[in-house]
Image (cartoon, coloured by chain):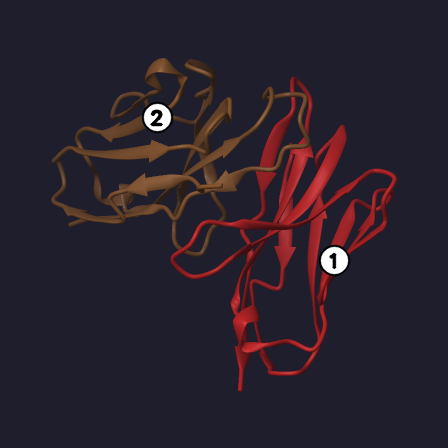
């Protein structure tokens, strides 16, 4: 079974530029998550999708971050414009079943390391 | 407030030694607790999961314990190997208003030859 795919793996941009990350979850997984992981910290949930609908985006900085999951499969996360404090690893994860009824195991991709200079 | 706290923040041990990582949580109501291993440059991978009624779960050289009364968990690594060098993240599922997934900050383990 193929795992969660993310691209690019690394990205360096200047502040105020825009950037987009792509995630392809495990086939058949209904729930998709985007996390921000700052060095030395645990992942912080940015947004959670159930199929193509948003379940939780309470910690997404909506003035600069946006995400979509068209057709309930692939997802993109965009930052526009980027700030220095956005430097982090952006992890995508997916899980089978419904968001609130499964045992909660999430399968993570390798992440995209973003550096904002 | 639902929180997960881990200790120590980092740990250095010699290859072949045992170690124990700690996780304290305040999440209520509680659903389950997972330990994840995150290798450098990789995403986290689940090691164990425990529900309220389970107090010990093993996965090879990894043994997790859970005390739901004191809201504490530990991850014990036996006969450590160089490949155990990673971050270990405690994740608790639960909370009011729906089931949230709360991540700890992780313990960074370095195993030296």
The image quadrant of residue B13 is: bottom right
Compute the Cα span from label 1 to label 2. 36 Å
Q: Relative to B16, is A47 above or below?
A: above
The image quadrant of residue B58 is: bottom right
Chain coloured red: B
- Mark 1 burial class by Cα count in 10 Å: few <14, some 14-19, many 20+: many
Element under disc 1? strand
Nearer to us in this view, A51 or B92: A51
Q: Relative to A67, is A36 above or below?
A: below
Left or right position of B52 against B10: right
Left or right position of A111 against A84: right
- Mark 2 burial class by Cα count in 10 Å: few <14, some 14-19, many 20+: some
Image spot of residue B41 (x, y percent): 38, 57
Label 2 resides on the chain identified as A
Nearer to us in this view, B24 or A37: A37
**Which residue corresponds to the image point at 60% horizontal and 19% vertical from the top-left?**
A98
**Which residue corresponds to the image point at 33% horizontal and 16% vertical from the top-left?**
A70
**Which residue corresponds to the image point at 26% horizontal and 35% vertical from the top-left?**
A21
Label 1 resides on the chain identified as B
Element under disc 2? loop
Q: Which residue is mark 1?
A: B74
Nearer to us in this view, B105 or A98: A98
């Amino acid at each position: 079974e193929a795992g969660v795919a993310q691209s690019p793996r690394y990205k360096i941009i200047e502040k105020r530029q825009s950037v987009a990350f792509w995630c392809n979850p495990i086939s058949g997984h209904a729930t998709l998550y985007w996390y921000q992981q700052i060095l030395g910290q645990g992942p912080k949930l940015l947004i959670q999708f159930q199929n193509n609908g948003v379940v939780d985006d309470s910690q997404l900085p909506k003035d600069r971050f946006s995400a979509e999951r068209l057709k309930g499969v692939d997802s993109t996360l965009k930052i526009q414009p980027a700030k220095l404090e956005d430097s982090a690893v952006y992890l995508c994860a997916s899980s089978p079943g419904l968001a609130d009824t499964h045992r909660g195991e999430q399968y993570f991709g390798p992440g995209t390391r973003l550096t904002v200079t | 407030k639902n929180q997960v706290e881990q200790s120590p923040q980092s740990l250095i041990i010699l290859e072949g030694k045992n170690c124990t990582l700690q996780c304290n949580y305040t999440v209520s109501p509680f659903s389950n607790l997972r330990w994840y291993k995150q290798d450098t440059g990789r995403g986290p991978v689940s090691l164990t999961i425990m529900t309220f009624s389970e107090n010990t779960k093993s996965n090879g050289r990894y043994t997790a314990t859970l005390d739901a009364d004191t809201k504490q968990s530990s991850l014990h690594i036996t006969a450590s190997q160089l490949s155990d060098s990673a971050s270990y993240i405690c994740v608790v599922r639960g909370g009011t208003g729906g089931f949230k997934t709360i991540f700890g900050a992780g313990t960074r383990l370095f195993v030296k030859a």
